[in-house]
Image (spheres, rainbow, N blue to C red):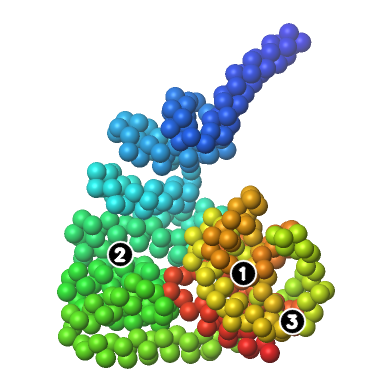
Amino acid sequence: MKKIALVLAYLTFIIGCAIRPIENKVEQILALENDSLFVQQALPIFNDVESENLKHLLNERLFPLVVDKEEEVYQSVLMAVKESHNAMQYAMLANSVAWKNRDNKVLENRLFLLIEDAVKQCQTDEFIDALSIYLEERDYTPLEKIEAEPQYRAMVLDTYAYYLMKMNRQEEALSIYQEILEEYEDPEILINASKAQASLNRYQQAMESILKALRQAPAHPEALRLIYEYGESLSYPPSAIDSMVEKAVQEAREETERQLETIRIERPMPAFTLENIDGTILRSEDLKGKILVIDFFATWCGPCRRELPKLHQLYKTYREDDTVHFIVISTDEDRSKVKPFLKENNYTFPVYYGNGLSDKLGVKGVPTIYIVDGDGTIRYEKRGYAEGEDLEYALMMYINSLR
């Protein structure tokens, strides 16, 4: 028995020694910054990786880089991705790859099949279960999960409809947009639906979709362009379209005011000590009695880059108001990028490093804005930024409601 045990131990040792070098090699490959070198070293071993986590990471990075490779290579990596990713992870990765390469005519058929497959995954129970776990791990409440699930499906379906439009399958694309809008409605989807309607010469329907989009995002540049384009097709005079736009903006602002009471929350603001990028210290006890506008951002975040100019404009509006204080917090791990970013964009609002405050508040993503009243209670929380939203007006309403 002792000999058998020794043999088994030896075999286990040998197997472990064989696996570990592969894992070490994968970790080294994942650390490569050069994509070409990464692909060159990853392709020969991606099917031999035992660690589920490393296999997932390797395939996640490899797949977008081989989308333009020969069919055999592409299909083999695609199969590996399906094996190492659950339905939700696969659908979102496929969507990302299809969207990023949407203007590539050479790959159009390959990408269409990919996004079509992602849509099928979105309709499975496995997708819903995996998405639910994903959201739970990020501390989404049951209500937040109900709101988020249609958004994830909408992202994939929207890309699918985009490809259908490219292939002159407008009726099918419009059907997909109608499917999305049955459970989720946002300005981008409405704008895209209007394009499908207009392509079928249904300009009155397109106009109605654009007006809905403007009521949600009254400053959206594409919606403002399209409403005049559709109006011209319907022979509306410019003055009539101007009136429609003004009414949509007014309705959007009235809706913001109506929602003030329903979205107001009551949550204690934790004490904090923050370091300004110039090295000075800010403590929460020094801000008693002030209304705080606290914004979390990152230099790499696209929505943050679109939100910050509006926030900066609002900051300049309240700069002389001693009752309102702006705290803009960088969540960048690489602090060296923050100062050049601020200088490049001429931002003058005070910027701080988080020092764990985002964890205390449970920030799930950036941008996120909190409005805190003079008693130290969080009254409003706003997550994300949508193109064209009337951010300055909304934040002004939040601030003024606390005076």
Quarter holding residue 388: bottom left
| Closer to viewer: mark 2 or mark 1 | 1
Helix, strand or loop for disc 2: helix
Q: Residue at x 44, y 70 (%)?
A: 387
x, y percent for residue 258: 53, 89
The quadrant in which the C terminus is found is bottom right
| Above or below for 229 versus 101 | below
Give the residue drawn at x 30%, y 64%: 176
Q: Amino acid at mark 2?
A: Ile
Q: Could you tell me which quadrant the N terminus lies in?
A: top right
Q: Quadrant of residue 36?
A: top left
Q: Are marks 2 and 1 in contact (CB under 8 Å)?
A: no
Amino acid of disc 3: Lys
Can you identify the residue that label 1 sits on? 348
Alpha-carbon distance for marks 1 and 3?
20 Å
Query: What secondary structure is marked by label 1?
Result: loop
Judged from the image, the secondary structure of the residue bearing numbered disc 3 is loop
Amino acid carrying label 1: it is Thr
Report whether 12 appears left or right of 125: right
* Residue 317 percent coordinates (x, y): 59, 82
The reply, left or right, for residue 355 in relation to residue 125 is: right
Q: Furthest residue to the top?
A: 3
Residue 252's disc is none
Q: Which mark is drawn over residue 176?
A: 2
User: On the image, numbered disc 3 is attached to which residue?
Assistant: 290
User: Dot 1: within a 10 Å radius of its alpha carbon, few (fewer than 14), some, or many (20 or more) residues?
Assistant: few
Q: Earlier in the sequence, mark 3 or mark 2?
A: 2
Q: Residue at x 23, y 72 (%)?
A: 197
